[in-house]
Image (cartoon, rainbow, N blue to C red):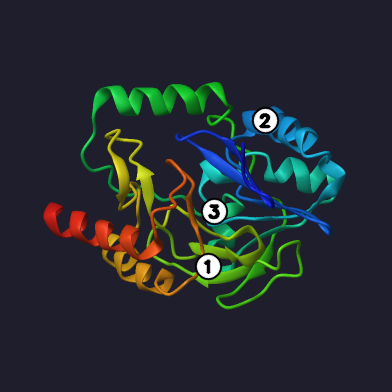
């Protein structure tokens, strides 16, 4: 799905990944689920591109539903994979966590688990090698993605600001579709290690000039970053 001249999305509101397309090549933001490989290659073809044009994968964090085809790109095509230093062990499968689920609606979670299973989410291939990044770093990749520390969902969760795409990618720093309840709109993401820290980290998004706020789960948001953060804080306060 084309969102802008330099911006594409693959997947859907359950699990999404993104492509930044520039003259220098393609940067992939998150790698979804392994079974979304065909969607990746199809979207690249629609852009007049191929896997050989991918210069790097940047992970917003190290959870399995964001690792998807990353190791395949690294192992088979020599594409480097970048992740925050605090999530490197997580992305390599060396650290396993079991955060609380919270409220669940049967239909919503059944749909998410069915989709994840159908797309290879039960057969995660962890990364063998990663390149670690730090808060504030601007990566030498198409679009010059800037790393913004967004800890809370995981210790190494990051947002990625890409001005040429007019977008900030937030992974599970927030969601616009809660995979456990089906609720739509900006809200705290489930499976979060430290909900209070995740909420506090959202202040780092305020002041960013970007049309698109793009989560790993949910509808792309173009209603204003400040409005999204305000809505999330309001919902968190109401729930707490």
Give the quadrant of residue 165: bottom right
The residue under label 1 is 86
Q: Position of residue 221 (x, y in %)?
A: 43, 49
Read off the residue under disc 2: 39
- SS for tag 3? loop
- For the residues carrying marks 1 and 2, which lies nearer the camera in this image? 2
Q: What residue lies at 57% left-to-right and 49% top-to-bottom?
A: 93
Q: Is residue 4 above or below residue 229?
A: above
Quarter residue 67 falls in: top right
Question: Residue 145 or 240: which is nearer the viewer?
Answer: 145
Residue that numbered label 3 is attached to: 62
Q: Position of residue 121 (x, y in %)?
A: 54, 31
Judged left or right of residue 100, residue 235 is left
Along the line of sight, which residue is nearer the eye, 100 or 56? 56
**Where residue 106 appears, x then y in whole percent?**
26, 24
- Residue at image point 43% right, 41% down: 219
The C terminus lies in quadrant: bottom left
| Quadrant including the N terminus | top right
Q: SS class of the residue under badge 2?
A: helix
Q: Are marks 1 and 2 in contact (CB under 8 Å)?
A: no
- The answer to which of 168 and 57 lies nearer the viewer is 168
Q: Residues within 10 Å of mark 1 (few under 14, many from 20)?
A: some
* C-alpha gap between disc 1 and disc 2: 29 Å
- Mark closer to the chain start, 1 or 3: 3
Mark 2 near mark 3, Cβ–Cβ under 8 Å?
no
Q: Measured along the vertical axis of the image, is residue 137 above or below residue 159?
A: below
Residue at left 50%, top 37%? Answer: 15
* Residue sitting farthest toward the bottom: 136
Which of the two labelled residues, at mark 1 and mark 2, occupies the earlier sequence position?
2
Q: Residues within 10 Å of mark 3 (few under 14, many from 20)?
A: many
Measured Cα–Cα span from mark 1 to mark 3:
9 Å
């Amino acid at each position: 799905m084309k969102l802008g001249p330099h911006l594409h999305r693959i997947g859907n509101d359950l699990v999404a990944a993104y492509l930044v397309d520039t003259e220098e090549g393609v940067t992939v933001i998150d790698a979804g689920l392994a079974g979304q490989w065909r969607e990746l290659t199809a979207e690249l073809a629609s852009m007049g591109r191929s896997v050989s044009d991918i210069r790097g994968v940047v992970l917003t964090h190290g959870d399995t539903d964001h690792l998807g085809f990353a190791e395949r790109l690294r192992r088979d095509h020599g594409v480097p994979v970048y992740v925050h230093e605090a999530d490197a062990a997580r992305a390599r499968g060396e650290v396993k966590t079991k955060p609380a689920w919270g409220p669940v609606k049967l239909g919503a979670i059944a749909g998410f688990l069915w989709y994840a299973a159908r797309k290879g989410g039960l057969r995660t291939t962890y990364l063998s090698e990663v390149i670690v990044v730090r808060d504030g770093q601007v990566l030498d990749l198409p679009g010059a993605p800037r790393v913004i520390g967004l800890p809370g969902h995981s210790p190494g969760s990051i947002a990625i600001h890409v001005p040429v795409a007019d977008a900030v990618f937030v992974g599970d720093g927030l969601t616009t579709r809660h995979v456990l309840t089906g609720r739509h709109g900006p809200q705290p993401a489930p499976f979060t290690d430290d909900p209070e820290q995740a909420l506090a980290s959202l202040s780092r998004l305020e002041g960013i000039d970007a049309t698109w706020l793009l989560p790993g789960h949910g509808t792309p948001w173009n209603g204003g970053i400040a409005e999204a953060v305000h809505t999330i804080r309001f919902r968190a306060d109401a729930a707490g």
